[in-house]
Image (tube, rainbow, N blue to C red):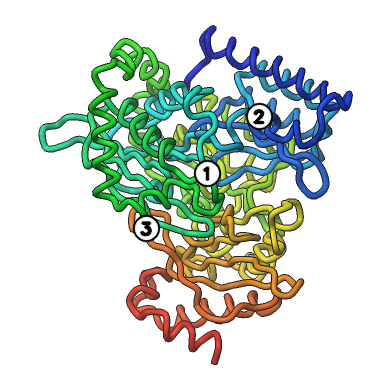
């Protein structure tokens, strides 16, 4: 994985020193909260319902055991002994005290971590495939290009005050595990007919108040030119994006209003002026960064079979383990959705366990996933059983990846000032109906439920096979039900099924949906999403509202 050089560390140290001074001025009442707000937002610090919330950047979701131990230390020292992993592959802490924040920043900087550009109208944390560099189905590791984007975008003077926040994702396989079509820019690495490596470029995707699936702005841009092309996109957006209306400020609105043809024309014209200026990284820099993502020292000839005689272990392998490009190795997903758990939460003790397991079994590397889980990407098949036993002892071995209890949920009204309704209890109550029977969950099959506490859509409800949106209905919490969304390569937007429900009603409605699906699917292997697409909304609506 990438390690800071002296320039990276100098940038972080300088920014930390600057923000520590700003925090001190706020604590001494030399600046007001209104004056402090834009400064703290540029450094990942939100003021939420009960306390400050800090969002720490985990670029493209990759971190080391040392960094995970520091995150555990921060949870113990500065929070309430847990952290919340997010759909942007970051981690959030919900109980930060401002007077301790300077020490927290210092601790982060010691392990090459920080919190800036995790909020504000700038280019946010670059996200990627959690299986990058390990997946059997990828063209190449996309993370070196995500790292180039990180370096290019960090404190970029031209793009520090964009019309609105800006999100970029990078993948390198036909399977989209990062929802690139629902990003402001989505980049898919592939080889063209001539064998050249480059990117298919999507623009204008996003969720929230106006969900839109991104469109292809360029079918192919060589890897050596993708930075200048990204800059051209950002320049067109920065020039024309709305600043007078926060609800129309995202690039998706600009692309929709201009049309993809006109937007493409403007980007190509902008790029024609930029490309000759040498803004792209020289080949030596590509080589330097790519070298830092070299494959770990795999054991050649490692046994390529797994002893599945333990039925509980077999269940976990079947559900949570994926194929690795290297014979004898596997990719293991650690579920952060245990029984009665809060989706995405991990205690400091669990973080320490995961760090130790990464050291022992996974070449000291951990990934955060788009669906609020964790991954150990390079595990010998011969070590899986011992690792699973350690995970089980820490309540981290739930075999529910992509099943009905593997629910994405935002913090909702338990923490967030923007939320209209709670998300966490809804996720817990739905999961409680199924979590005592893994066999029932597996019979239901792949079913992605996503819960948001407000229209901003941090729980990605528009990309859920079943999406749930919390709304305010005359001062009471209510929930809309949406069906048919997907953030994968078959991207689609979920649509509202009918009138909303109270808390008990939405739980009952989901139960009815699942029961109807199980009776209506054409085969046991037909996914909920495929049954919905085949039959349409009408019979599902009848099942819920009749």
Q: Residue furthest top?
A: 6
| 17 vs 139, nearest the viewer | 17
* Residue occupying image coordinates x 69% and y 29%: 39
The answer to whether 287 appears left or right of 408 in the picture is: left
Crowding at mark 3 (Cα within 10 Å: few <14, some 14-19, many 20+)? some
Crowding at mark 1 (Cα within 10 Å: few <14, some 14-19, many 20+)? some
- The nearer-to-camera label among 2 and 1 is 1
Q: Position of residue 195 (x, y in %)?
A: 14, 31
Q: Position of residue 434 (x, y in %)?
A: 61, 69
* Residue occupying image coordinates x 66% and y 36%: 55
Residue 243, numbered circle? 1
Which quadrant: the C terminus? bottom right
* Residue occupying image coordinates x 28% and y 13%: 283
Residue underneath mark 2: 43
Residue 165, numbered circle? none
SS type, badge 1: loop
* Distance of label 3 from label 2 (alpha carbons): 32 Å
Q: Residue furthest right?
A: 28
SS type, badge 3: loop
Residue underneath mark 3: 491
Q: Visible in this render: residue 383?
A: no
Q: Position of residue 54 (x, y in %)?
A: 71, 36
SS type, badge 2: loop
């Amino acid at each position: 994985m990438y390690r800071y050089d002296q320039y990276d560390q100098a940038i972080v140290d300088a920014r930390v020193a600057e923000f520590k001074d700003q925090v001190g001025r706020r604590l001494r009442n030399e600046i007001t909260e209104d004056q402090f707000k834009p400064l703290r937002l540029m450094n990942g610090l939100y003021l939420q319902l009960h306390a400050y919330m800090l969002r720490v950047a985990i670029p493209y979701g990759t971190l080391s055991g040392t960094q995970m131990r520091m995150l555990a230390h921060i949870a113990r020292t500065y929070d309430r002994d847990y952290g919340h992993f997010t759909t942007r592959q970051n981690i959030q802490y919900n109980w930060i005290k401002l007077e301790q924040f300077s020490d927290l920043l210092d601790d982060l900087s010691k392990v090459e971590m920080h919190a800036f550009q995790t909020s504000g109208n700038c280019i946010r944390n670059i996200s990627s495939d959690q299986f990058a560099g390990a997946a059997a189905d990828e063209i190449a590791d996309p993370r070196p290009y995500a790292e180039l984007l990180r370096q290019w975008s960090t404190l970029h003077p031209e793009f520090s005050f964009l019309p609105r926040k800006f999100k970029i994702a990078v993948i390198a396989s036909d399977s989209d595990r990062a929802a690139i079509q629902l990003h402001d820019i989505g980049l898919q690495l592939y080889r063209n007919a001539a064998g050249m490596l480059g990117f298919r470029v999507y623009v204008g995707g996003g969720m929230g108040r106006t969900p839109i699936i991104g469109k292809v702005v360029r079918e192919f841009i060589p890897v050596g030119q993708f930075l200048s092309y990204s800059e051209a996109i950002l320049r067109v957006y920065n020039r024309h994006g709305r600043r007078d209306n926060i609800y129309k400020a995202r690039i998706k609105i600009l692309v929709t209003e201009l049309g993809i043809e006109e937007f493409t024309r403007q980007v190509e014209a902008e790029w024609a002026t930029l490309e000759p200026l040498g803004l792209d990284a020289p080949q030596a820099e590509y080589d330097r960064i790519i070298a830092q993502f070299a494959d770990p020292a795999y054991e050649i000839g490692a046994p390529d079979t797994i002893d599945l005689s333990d039925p509980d272990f077999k269940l976990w392998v079947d559900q949570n383990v994926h194929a690795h490009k290297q014979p004898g190795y596997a990719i293991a997903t650690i579920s952060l959705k245990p029984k009665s758990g809060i989706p995405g939460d991990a205690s400091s003790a669990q973080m320490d366990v995961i760090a130790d397991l990464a050291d022992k079994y996974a070449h000291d590397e951990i990934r955060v996933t788009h669906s609020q889980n964790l991954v150990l990407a390079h595990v010998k098949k011969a070590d899986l059983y011992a690792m699973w036993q350690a995970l089980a002892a820490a309540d981290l071995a739930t075999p529910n990846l992509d099943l009905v209890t593997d629910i994405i949920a935002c913090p909702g009204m338990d923490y967030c000032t923007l939320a209209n309704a709670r998300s966490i209890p809804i996720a817990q109550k739905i999961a409680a109906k199924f979590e005592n029977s893994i066999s029932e969950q597996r019979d239901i099959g792949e079913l992605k439920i996503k819960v948001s506490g407000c229209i901003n859509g941090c729980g990605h409800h528009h990309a859920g096979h079943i999406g749930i949106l919390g709304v305010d209905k005359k001062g009471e919490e209510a929930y809309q039900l949406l069906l048919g969304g997907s953030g994968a390569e078959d991207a689609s937007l979920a649509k509202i099924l009918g009138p909303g429900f109270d808390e008990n009603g939405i739980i009952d409605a989901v139960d009815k949906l699942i029961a109807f699906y199980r009776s209506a699917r054409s085969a046991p292997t037909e996914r909920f999403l495929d049954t919905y697409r085949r039959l349409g909304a009408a019979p599902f609506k009848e099942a819920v509202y009749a």
